[in-house]
Image (cartoon, grey):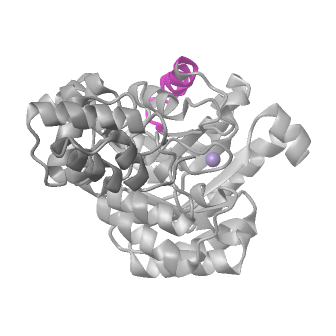
């Protein structure tokens, strides 16, 4: 049986740290409901001590969502920890997540604290949280730039205080996949019982690869954000981690317990409320993730989608009708034929060839063809007395 990967879904916390995003409490609740309904284990919903609106949102979600664990992060200060617990304590399942920076750079420049002081704060932070709940996870911020002996020292200390999960964090997206995997393996070797969460950022485009490397080396949980949101270049994208595991589960010997058919609706909800659309070529959820532009590819997909698609659109909740054949300069007759059929034209091979030639001519003058243009090409092909000039004159005109 493949091991089921857990999720610490942080769209509502790290994801909201994306510069430019600010959800109102009701919007956070709507997203939390969608994430909980998909089956994610823990929803990291905010930073209670950051202010009244965040506290209110956490409390609202905690009182309304019972089918996932609701978490607030906190620094290792007593007041932060108390506020975090106060914000989530009404949840059916609640957890808190103290963190502290552990790297020498962060210790010296940001915190102005010694190793010993940081160690002590980590220890007392977890101990204080444990007075409220056994569900206390701990994160070593900037783990991947921390001395390895200090990582082990801190992990040992917080585990002894009863930390449930320990998040190893590539806070600045600096790690390479095999390094992150080795780090997880090293911590597991030293503390075989420790439960590790992989928190990876995407500054070098390696977040998902790092998270997977962590998982196959013994991490049990992934921190991730929908649409790859998060600080700077974002976190490991939830949809990527989910579909990478689901698509390659036989080879990874891992699986997810998540309703993948809700990926597109949830991604679109978050895109709408965040005001940030995924880039067109974004894996899994981008507008082009199931669109085909080259004639050779289109011909293959029309014969059997498996030629160029490793996931089925319906598996992520994308209506099959949204698998797009793009009619462009590089596309082929098969795609044009399919597109024209959808518009109600059934052309003979000769007519199709003529329509195809007209389309190619038109694309020398106009960057993108619209439905009206395709209709004109089809009509002109059926009625060969019309000329290309007629076509150009009547085609919807937004040529640049
Ligand atoms: Mn982060």
- In the rendered image of this protein, does residue 116 appear above or below residue 11? above
Magenta residues? 178-196
Total numbered circles: 0
Does 347 sit left or right of 3 as displayed? left
Q: Quadrant of the N terminus?
A: top left
Q: Residue at x 90, y 41 (%)?
A: 109
Residue 162 against residue 252 in the figure, above or below: below
Q: Residue at x 41, y 61 (%)?
A: 268
Q: Quadrant of residue 98?
A: bottom right
Q: Nearer the viewer, residue 280 or 8?
A: 280
Q: Residue 210: x, y in percent? A: 51, 29
Res. 255 image quadrant = top left
Residue 254 seen in the figure: no
Left or right: 82 in relation to 336: right
x, y (%) of residue 316?
A: 27, 49
Frontmost residue, 349 versus 190:
349
Dominant SS type (magenta)? helix
Tell which residue pokes out farthest to the front in this image. 385
Q: Is residue 85 left or right of residue 272?
A: right
Q: Residue at x 63, y 57 (%)?
A: 127
Residue 229 position (above or below residue 270): above
Based on the picture, tell me whether residue 124 belongs to the magenta stretch.
no
Task: Residue 150 in the image: state x and y as whole percent.
Answer: 72, 29
Q: Nearer the viewer, residue 127 or 297?
A: 297
Report x, y in % for residue 309.
Answer: 25, 32
Asked if one can make out residue 129 in the rendered structure from this viewpoint, the answer is yes
- The residue sitting at 65% across, 35% down in the picture is 203
**Could you say which is closer to the camera, residue 347 or residue 11?**
347
């Amino acid at each position: 049986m493949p091991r089921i990967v857990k999720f610490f879904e942080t769209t509502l916390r790290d994801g909201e740290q994306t510069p430019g995003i600010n959800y109102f409490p009701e919007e956070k609740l709507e997203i939390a409901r969608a994430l909980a309904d998909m089956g994610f284990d823990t929803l990291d919903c905010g930073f209670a001590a950051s202010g009244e609106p965040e506290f209110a949102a956490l409390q609202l979600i905690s009182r309304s969502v019972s089918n996932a664990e609701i978490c607030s992060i906190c620094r290792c200060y007593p007041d932060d920890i108390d506020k975090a617990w106060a914000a989530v304590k009404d949840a059916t399942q609640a957890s808190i997540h103290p963190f502290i920076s552990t790297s020498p750079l962060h210790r010296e420049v940001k915190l102005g604290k010694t190793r010993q002081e940081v160690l002590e704060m980590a220890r007392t932070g977890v101990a204080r949280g444990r007075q409220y709940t056994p569900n206390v996870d701990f994160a070593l911020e900037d783990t991947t730039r921390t001395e390895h002996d200090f990582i082990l020292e801190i992990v040992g200390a917080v585990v002894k205080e009863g930390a449930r999960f320990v998040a190893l964090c590539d806070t600045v997206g600096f790690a390479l996949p095999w390094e992150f995997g080795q780090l997880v393996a090293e911590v597991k070797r030293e503390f075989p019982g420790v439960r590790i969460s992989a928190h990876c950022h995407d500054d070098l485009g390696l977040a998902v690869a790092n998270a997977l490397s962590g998982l196959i080396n013994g991490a049990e949980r992934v921190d991730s954000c929908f649409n790859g949101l998060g600080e700077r270049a974002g976190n490991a994208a939830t949809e990527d981690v989910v579909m990478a595991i689901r698509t390659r589960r036989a080879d990874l010997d891992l699986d997810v317990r998540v309703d993948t058919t809700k990926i597109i609706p949830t991604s679109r909800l978050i895109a709408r409320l965040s005001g940030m659309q995924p880039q067109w070529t974004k894996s899994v959820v981008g507008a082009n993730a199931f669109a085909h532009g080259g004639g050779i590819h289109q011909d293959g997909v029309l014969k059997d989608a498996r030629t160029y698609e490793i996931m089925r659109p319906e598996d992520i909740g994308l209506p099959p009708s949204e698998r797009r054949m793009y009619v462009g300069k590089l596309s082929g007759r098969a795609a044009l034929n399919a597109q024209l059929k959808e518009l109600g034209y059934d052309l003979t091979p000769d007519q199709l060839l003529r329509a195809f030639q007209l389309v190619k001519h038109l694309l020398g003058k106009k960057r993108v063809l619209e439905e009206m243009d395709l209709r004109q090409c089809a009509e002109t092909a059926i009625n060969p007395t019309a000329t290309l000039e007629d076509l150009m004159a009547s085609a919807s005109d937004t040529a640049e």
